[in-house]
Image (spheres, rainbow, N blue to C red):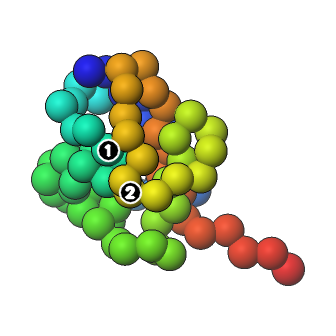
Amino acid sequence: MKITVLYFASIREALGVSQETVTTEAATVGALRDHLVQRGGAYAGLATKPPGVCMALNQQLCQTSAPLSDGAEVAFFPPVTGG
């Protein structure tokens, strides 16, 4: 299936891209993250356990167990703090 992956803030800066389309067999957001981490390099930073990396599926915060479907949009971003 094809998934649109969005990267924000320091993750975007580390990867040098703001979005990409990924073809994957991953069934969950966590499995997609693992798939990306296997690329190595800056992608390894996605392996940080929460709260190091937040995830959203179709613009809603989600857990690693959230199921993926073809055409989904997944976003990875650092935790946001208020002030």
Q: Using the image as rendered, state which of residue 58 and residue 79 is in the foreground.
A: 58
Amino acid type at circle 1 is: Thr
User: Left of 78 or right of it: where is 14?
Assistant: left
- The extreme bottom residue here reads 83
Query: Which residue is found at the position 31% from the left and 53% from the top?
Result: 30
* Residue hosting label 2: 64
User: Left of 32 or right of it: where is 56?
Assistant: right
Point out the image quarter for the C terminus: bottom right
Point out the image quarter for the N terminus: top left
Q: Quadrant of residue 81?
A: bottom right
Residue 46 visible here? yes
Query: Which residue is found at the position 59% from the left and 69% from the top?
Result: 79
Amino acid type at circle 2 is: Thr
Residue 10 visible here? no
The relative height of residue 13 versus residue 18 in the rendered view (above or below) is below
Mark 2 neighbour density, 10 Å: few (under 14) some (14–19) many (20 or more): some
User: Left of 18 or right of it: where is 1?
Assistant: left
Mark 1 neighbour density, 10 Å: few (under 14) some (14–19) many (20 or more): some
Q: Using the image as rendered, state which of residue 38 and residue 15 is in the foreground.
A: 38
* Residue hosting label 1: 28
Query: Which residue is found at the position 42% from the left and 19% from the top?
Result: 71
Residue 55 location (% of width, % of height): 50, 54
Q: Secondary structure at mark 2?
A: loop
Distance from Cα at disc 1 to Cα at disc 2: 7 Å
Q: Secondary structure at mark 1?
A: loop
